[in-house]
Image (cartoon, rainbow, N blue to C red):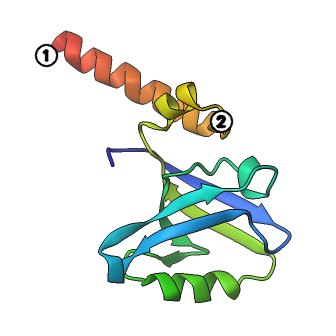
């Protein structure tokens, strides 16, 4: 996964949130959003498949196993806040598969990244 922007995702109303996670410390993989259900709380939140979950309700996720993350998610009753690192290539995936369009926050982040990349190539 490349360098992405950090985005705060907020959802309310309790589970089900409408997304599935994969990875964890025991798998030696970052915790990532594996799937987002259409017409769910997650689908309208700005969360994208492939986003890396940095923290859940203020709890860092880097050292959590997948079962620990499941337990943490099950303890959340009403309000979910996640800090995620967005996928840089999600914009390009969106152009190929528009079933999960990225949020405006994601698009603005990708646009600034693309402009910076082009500027570096032109100047370098």
Pointer 1: what residue? Answer: 124
Q: Is residue 109 above or below residue 36?
A: above
Picture quarter containing residue 79? bottom right
Residue plotted at (22% across, 10% down): 122
Horizontal placement of 89 versus 91: left or right?
left
Q: Is residue 17 above or below residue 108?
A: below
In the rendered image, residue 50, in percent from the top left (x then y), is placed at 48, 52
Instruction: Give the mark, 1 or 2, whose residue is nearer the N terminus.
Output: 2
Horizontal placement of 108 versus 103: left or right?
left
Q: Nearer the viewer, mark 1 or mark 2?
A: 2
Give the secondary structure at mark 2.
loop
Horizontal placement of 14 versus 33: left or right?
right
Label at residue 97: none
Residue plotted at (45% across, 75% down): 61
Give the secondary structure at mark 1.
loop
Pointer 2: what residue? Answer: 101
């Amino acid at each position: 996964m490349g360098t992405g922007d950090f985005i705060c995702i907020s959802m309310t109303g309790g589970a089900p949130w409408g997304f599935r996670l994969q990875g964890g410390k025991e798998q030696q993989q970052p915790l990532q959003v594996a799937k987002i259900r259409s017409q769910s709380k997650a689908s309208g939140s700005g969360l994208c498949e492939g986003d890396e979950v940095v923290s859940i309700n203020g709890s860092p996720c880097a050292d959590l196993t997948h079962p620990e993350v499941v337990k943490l998610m099950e303890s959340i009753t009403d309000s979910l806040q996640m800090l995620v690192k967005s996928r840089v290539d999600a914009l390009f995936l969106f152009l190929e598969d528009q079933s999960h369009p990225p949020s405006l926050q994601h698009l603005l982040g990708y646009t600034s990244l693309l402009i910076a990349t082009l500027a570096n190539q032109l100047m370098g």
